[in-house]
Each structure stands twice: as C-alpha cells, then as structure tokens.
Amino acid sequence: MKKEKKNSTSSTSKFLFVVFFCAVFLTGGFSGLIWGIPSANAAIPTFVGCGAAAGAAAAITPVLPAGIAANDILLLFLETSGQAITIANGNGGTWTEVSGSPQSPSGAVTLTVFWSRYNGTQGDPTTSDSGNHQGGSICAYRGVVTTGNPWDVTSGSVDATSDVSGDIAGATTIGPDRLVVIVGAGATAADTPIATVVNSSLANISAVRVNAETGTGDGGGLTVFDGQKATAGAYSTTTVTFATATVKGMMTISLQPPVTTLANGTDPSNATIAPGASATDLDSFTLQTTDGSDTVTAATVTLGANTTSSLSSVAITSNDGATTYCSENDPVSNTVALSGCGIPVSTSPVQFKVRITPKSHANMPAVPGSAYSVTGTVTSFTGTNSQAGSDASSATITVDNQSPADVTGASGTAGVAQVSLSWTNPGDADLHSIVALRSTSAVTDTPVEGTVYTVGNSIGASIVACVTASPGTGCTDSGLTGGTNYHYKLLSRDTSGNYAAGVVPSGSPFSPTHAAPVTTSISPTTVAAGGSGFSLIVNGSGFDGDSVVRIGGSNRTTTFASSTQLSANILASDISSAGTRSITVFNPTPGGGTSNAQTLTVSSAPVAPTIQSFDASPSSVSIGESQTITFTWSAIGAATTCAITDPGNATIGSGGIIGTATTTQPQTTSAYTLTCTNVAGSDTAVATVTVSSGTSPQPSSSAPPVNLSGYGPANAHFYGYAYPGADIQIFTKSSVSGVYASVPFKTVTIANNGSFEVSLENFLQADYFFAIQAKDKNNNSTAIISFAQLAVAGVDWTIKDIILPPTLVLDSSVIGSKSPIFLNGYAIPGATVSLFVDGKTVGSTKPDSSGYYTFAATSTGLSLGSHSVYAKEIFSGKTSDPSLQKTFNLTTEAKSVVDLNGDQSATISDWSIFLSRWRTEDKKTRGTIDFNRDGKIDIIDFSIFLNAFQQARNSQ
C-alpha cells in the first residue's frame, strides 16, 4: 500500500508559501531556487538547569530545578564530611545512587550522587543527617534515555593530597552523542570550589552549572560542569583546579541519548533481471531504537559505481514492499539522497528493503548495450535519535542490457517455395533463440529490444521468418513465392530480451522456385447458366502470390488467401451457357506449372444456393454487457433471398446473397439460423452466440475462496493498473457453484496515470470469491479476471500488481481481403499492446497518455471466412490476460475503408471525398468517416484513413 501523508496549514506554512512566491517572482521563475528538506540532527542530551544549592548541619531538602519535564534525568550531587548519606524521603520520586558513587579520600570528604527520572509529579527530596554537615544541589538533563540507567559509563577518582589540582580518570563510551557530567567535591567552603575544568577529549565544556558549599561543621562544597563527546570511544583524564588546597572526591557521568541503530538485514539473493522488469529487492536492513520511538525522515543509499544509468527508480519500502516510504526516479548519482521518508522505528528491530526498478529497454543504451552489477546499502540516515550501526552488505542485482554474441557460419539454401537456413549458435549461457528476418531487399530493420516476436510478425519492412529456440541451429522458411529474391538477417536473442546486431547468411539473397500447384476442390461446384459473375474459392496446395486461377485455360483475377486457398473473379460471360468448365491453377517458372483440373458445372436448370459464410460478431459475450450482435453472410445462387431467424423462429433480418443484420444481445447462449432460398432449393447455416451463465459477468474459472472465518471483520486490498478514466468493478460470490452478484461490490474510477487502488473493508465472517473487471471511457469491458491464488494474512490481505487486459474494438465485422483490420481500444499508458489474429501475433503498438491505442493489421495471407482477434498488454515485465475476443468475416466483396467513391481502388478522388466529409456540418454525412465508431470525428479517424490509404496504394 502507498504511504499516505497528511498536510496541515499553519501560520508558518503560509509564511513559507508567501516567501516562495516572492522568491519566484523576484528571480523570474523556479530555476534560481534550490529546495531541500532540513535534516533533523540527532541531539546530544542537554542541560536544563539546577535547583538552588542547600547546606546545613542537619538534613537538607534540595529543590528541584525549574522548567523540568517528564523523563528529564535529575542528578542530586551531595558533599559530606567523609560520612555516608541517604535519601530519607523521596517525596514521590525514586532516587538511586549512581554507579561509582561515593568517592571519598581518607574520610575527609565524600562525594555522593543520586539520580531520579522525573515522573511529572514528584517533589523535593529530603536527605538523611550524615552527622557533621551536608551540602548539595539537583541538576536536570533532557534528551536522555527514558528506560534503564541514564548513563552508559561513569568514572571516579579521589585525591588525598591537599592541593588545588585533581585528576578524574577517563572512561570509554559505548556510543556517540554523550553528555559527560563533571563534578568535584572538596573540604572547602569557597564560593566557587572548582575554578576550571580541562579535558581535550570533550567539546564545549560548560561554565559552572552550580556551586554548592556550606561553612557549617567542617565546611565543604562541590561544583558541577559538563562537556560533549560526539563520537563513541574513550575520553581522557579530566583535570580540575580547585580554588583552595583540599583533598578531593570527583566523578564523571556519561549520559546516553536514545539511539537508533542501523543493521544489516537478511539480504535477498543475487539475481539477474531484464530491462523493464518490475521493482526488485536489492538490500535488506533493520532499524531499532534503544527505547521509545523515532522517525527516520531521510536516508542515503550508496550504489555501486557506474550503475545508476540502468535504473529508473530507487526506493525504500516495507519488508513486504507494500509501503513505499521514499524514492527517487532516474537517479543521476551513485549516492542517492532520499527525503520525506517517514520510516517508523521502535524498540523491536524491523526489516526494510531497498528496491530498484530497471529502466525499460527503450531507455537503455542501444546494441550492444552493457550489463550493470548493481549493489547498494544505506550509508546514512536522519532521525531525532542518536545513530549507530551500519548496513554492511547487499545483494548484487545484474541488470542485463548486454547483447548476446552473433551466430557464426550462417548460410542458406533455396528450395521449392522455401529457404533453409543454418548457423552455429554463440556460447552465451542465457541464449534464448535466433530470430530470422526476411525482406525482398537488404534487411536494415532491427527488432525492438525486449519484444518477443513470433513467425509472421512485421518489423518495419521485414517479416519474422523463423524463431528457433536455443539450442536449435536451423530453420526452414516456407510458403514463399518462387522467382523472388529473399534477403535474410539472423539475430541472437537472450533471455533478457536483448538482441545482437545480426548477421547476413552467406548466399543471401536466395531465390526459391515455385511449387507445382495441386487443386483438391472448388466452391461452388455448380452454378446456373446466365447468372452474374461470382467469387470462386479454389482449395489445394502449393499456391503463392503469383498463382493464377484459370477457367478453360484463361486467366482470371486471383486473390491469394493462403498457400492452400485462392479466390478468383469468375465473369458472367464465363457461365453464359450450360456445360462444364475446367478450373486449374497456374504457377510461373522457375518451377511451377499447371495443376490438375476441377470441374465447374454450369447448369441450364436453376441451382440451389450455397452459403459460403455466416458469422456472428461478437460470438461470445458476458451477461453484464449490452452489445449489439452483427451477423454477416455471403452465398452463391441466382434469384436467392436469405433470412436469419432467432431460436424462437422470429426473423431478425433478411437480404440477398450478401448481407448483414443486427440484433440485441441474447440473455442465454443462442443459435441463429440463416436460410438462403431460390426456386431450385435452399441451404442453411447456424451461427451461435455464447453467453456466460448467471446474472453477472462470470470469469472462465472459479477462484478458490478467501476463507476469513474465525477472524472477525476483514479487509481486502487490490492494487494494479488499467487505463485513465476507466471504472474498476469488483464482484463477489460465496460459493464455487454460485454466480457473481449482478451489482458490483465496489466500483472506483482509475487515476490519470492508470493505477488503481480498491479497498474493501469490514467483511463479515464467510468464504469469498472475487473477480475484477474494467470498463473504459467508451463503456467497453475487459475480460473478467478471477484470482487463482490468494493468501490471507491475519485480517488484512492484499493483491498487488494486477495488470488488467486492454479493451478491444473491431472497426468492422466484415473486412475485404485487401483491406486492413482496424483495431482500437484502451491500455495502460506506457504498456506495449500486442495484437493477435487467430492466435498469432500480428504486431504491437503503444497507447498514448490517455491509454488510447489504434492498430491496422494486414489481412494478407488470411483465408476467406471467419477469423478471431484479441489483444494483450505487457507492462512492467508482466503480461496481461487476453482481451475479450472479437470476430470478423473476410470476404472479397467487402468495401475498403478508403474506397469512398466505390471504384475498387484508392485514388486522389477518395482523399477529396474524405476532406469534404471532414469539413461538412451534416452529421449524417460526417458520420460516414467515423472509422473507429466512437461517435467522434477526430485525428484518430484521420490516422485510420491515412494508414488504410497507404496500405491500399501499396497493394494496387
């Protein structure tokens, strides 16, 4: 969870705000201002004050100093004539003799020191009567430990020689920031018993804090000083000079402050991560106070040399990573100063983490890159307490941006409609695969670092021909067009997604021969004489882009769908009279030849229609959605009418041999029937719309329950990423066989950066199943995600790093065989969206800052008929589930987006029509260029038209 910080308004903050704006105004902007957060320096204990001195022949009652507060340390210094003294009445306080007290030379003088921790209510204590006289005073000190003895070390010395000089033995402190109290007593009633104090190991030795003397009895007195010891270790002998010659009793008392100790934690294991990986644990450290609590407001993390260029973020977090206390993005120095931390520290050691996030591939050095061995420890911190300890070590996290070596000995051989490639793999231990790029000109394209490619993907003007997993050393690129020169480049890829520069195999380019075509069937096989022209489907093998369908030996305009399917435009003149026609496929040289023949029967009698395709889009929906189902069909047959009926046999649409119809989304899985009829007979086909069961969106699998029984009210937290402005919906149910509630348990709107936080609070005791879904700004939904593994920790549990799938909109459910497939939707800003047609990757794109993305996939190579499309996104090294799947029908008759004048081509005339419709105020006319169907005419529609125009021109 993210740490929440509260803001308060005070007169001070308002003043600083005014100062800030004055500074900005006078300097002409922000560039001349330097901002920082002041450190809360650890404090040596401080002197508060001393009460008035007291002296008498009988018991005395020294007064407490003024201005004292709870937990201040009170030291009662007493001088007697070599006689023991006690506290007869603590008056509500607890008084204990200090270690090393008393100090008494031969019974002539005795120095006794007692201490008490002020409880806020105690009064002035009363001593016993030592017998001759007693004199003394109470001094108070603040910022001392609040539990246990207030000192870490004391020292004492006596001097039985009556002179003015005395030495107090030194001592060794066990920690820094000590206030060393110095006291000396003698058989002298001078107003100032001690004149001077000298110790080269102590800084800032004070003036006299108090003199306490009495002339009663034998007479005597004492003087109190203090000095500072900033570092741990020994302090030397303290020399004191008395006003008159005397025997002496002397002490030093080292008062210790509260200490916050930094120590090494249980460090994570060494690891290698790829650019773009999520936050990774680098170091573990602990913090602990000697007593009370502390807050660490700032810390410095020192990284290994020359490694910051690999990092996008350095952060200090809680041990589980749920709370980020402070961080710095894109550090520029190996010494990373983190401020505004607010790390809580107590008397129990608590472990924290230093976490690093590597930069993405796009922000790392280009090929060949480098590997960065990142280490990092906390080398200093700022808090209220004194500080001790160190963070001794960390893990080594290697950010691998270094390219693997290239393959060697690469070569190739051309064959029939194929090229075989071979090579020797490099010796890199993390070699993942070899990617072969193909182009009809020299390959100059380079893959995007970190991107996983599959066969058929486009990289610039090149096509991914092969992806061979290590340790494979060869591949065959098939389905090529004979007589065409193909250029290749082989690129090594490692497990971190780094690519080598690539090598060209010897012999490139290669020119394969055409395959010998073979036909197996045609559709339709019978047509009526005198009918209109139609599209003939030819099935078989060995087809390529140069294949031509012939009828009676005459070439006809042919569309290449795949190596096993062609379509040809049969003219009305070809079937003007009854009889049979020979259908063959011709492939040119080299290789090639003419296929075996199929027979097309041209009947003088009417011919029953043949349905060629019938599809519903979308064909799979959730009950929580409200989608329009669009049906498309195509058929062959003269004087044919077609109609669609629903499960209740009601007609929902009708038309000729090519048509569309729509209906509202059914509430249960339903089969729709297309019937095409003419005088010779009829043909039927069925399209099924699958609807998930229940009364709300249901995930594909049931997640195990979160068992909160026995814990009382519980809380759940969901953290993840989707798209700005989307709504996150959480659904619940209570059993495996149950259905998710129709109304979301909770709905929140996502922040502008795409992140979301959903907290569900105060659950009753029960078992729970959870599912999550997002709806984008246009009310398009993601797939439903259930949680397959869920851990319960006490009464609070958390699911982090949820990556919701993108939404997906298909521009049209009917697409021409030469037209692009226009897709759009919303994804996480900064993610990579991969698009899939029939389960194969067709390319990737990046969304804009609002999360919106568009993509135009090629329909080249797809067979005529029904196809599916879906999207995934990759963010912070994690891949989402697929989007909801959409379907479309590929047909030769569909009109291209850019063919606005209907002449079957893309020309300047279409541009003129587009611009005219762009400028018109007629909403109906303007709506004809709303290509992404979002109800707006904007730059996105312009981009779709421009992309389609370029593709259409390239294919003409």
Image (cartoon, rainbow, N blue to C red):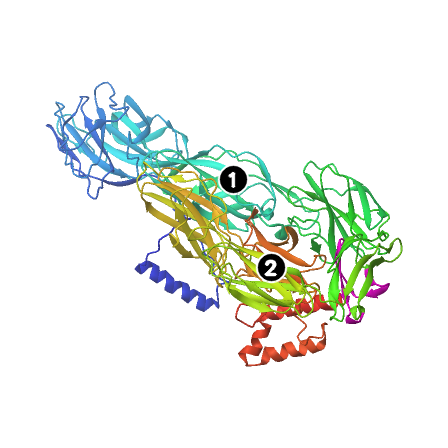
**Amino acid type assigned to the residue bearing label 1 in the image:** Asp
> Relative to 540, is 703 on the left or the right?
left
Q: Amino acid at mark 2?
A: Asp
Image-quadrant location for residue 350: top left
> Would you name the residue on which mark 1 appears?
281
Residue 861 x, y percent position in the rendering = 72, 57
Dot 2, how many residues are within 10 Å of its Cα: few (below 14), some (14-19), or many (20+)?
many
906 sits to left or right of 239: right
Q: Is residue 42 visible?
A: no
Q: Residue furthest right?
A: 590
Is residue 75 left or right of 405 when viewed as pictured?
left
Vertical placement of residue 466 versus 197, above or below: below
**As displayed, is residue 294 above or below residue 640?**
above
Tell me if residue 679 comes above or below residue 494 in the rendering.
below
Assess whether residue 551 is covered by the magenta stretch. yes
Q: Secondary structure at mark 1?
A: strand
Q: Residue at x 57, y 59 (%)?
A: 673
Q: Secondary structure at mark 2?
A: strand
Alpha carbon distance from label 2 to label 1:
51 Å
Query: For residue 342: magenta?
Result: no
Q: Which residue is mark 2?
A: 615
Looking at the image, is mark 2 or mark 1 earlier in the sequence?
1
Magenta residues (range): 548-573
Q: How many dots with numbers?
A: 2
Depth check, front residue: 244 or 88 = 88
Q: Which residue extends farthest top? A: 106
- Expressed as whole percent of the image width and height from the top left, the position of residue 900 reads 66, 75
Q: Is residue 699 left or right of residue 362?
A: left
**How dense is the environment of label 1, judged by Cα within 10 Å: few (below 14), some, or many (20 and up)?**
many
- Tell me, for residue 776, which label it has, or none: none
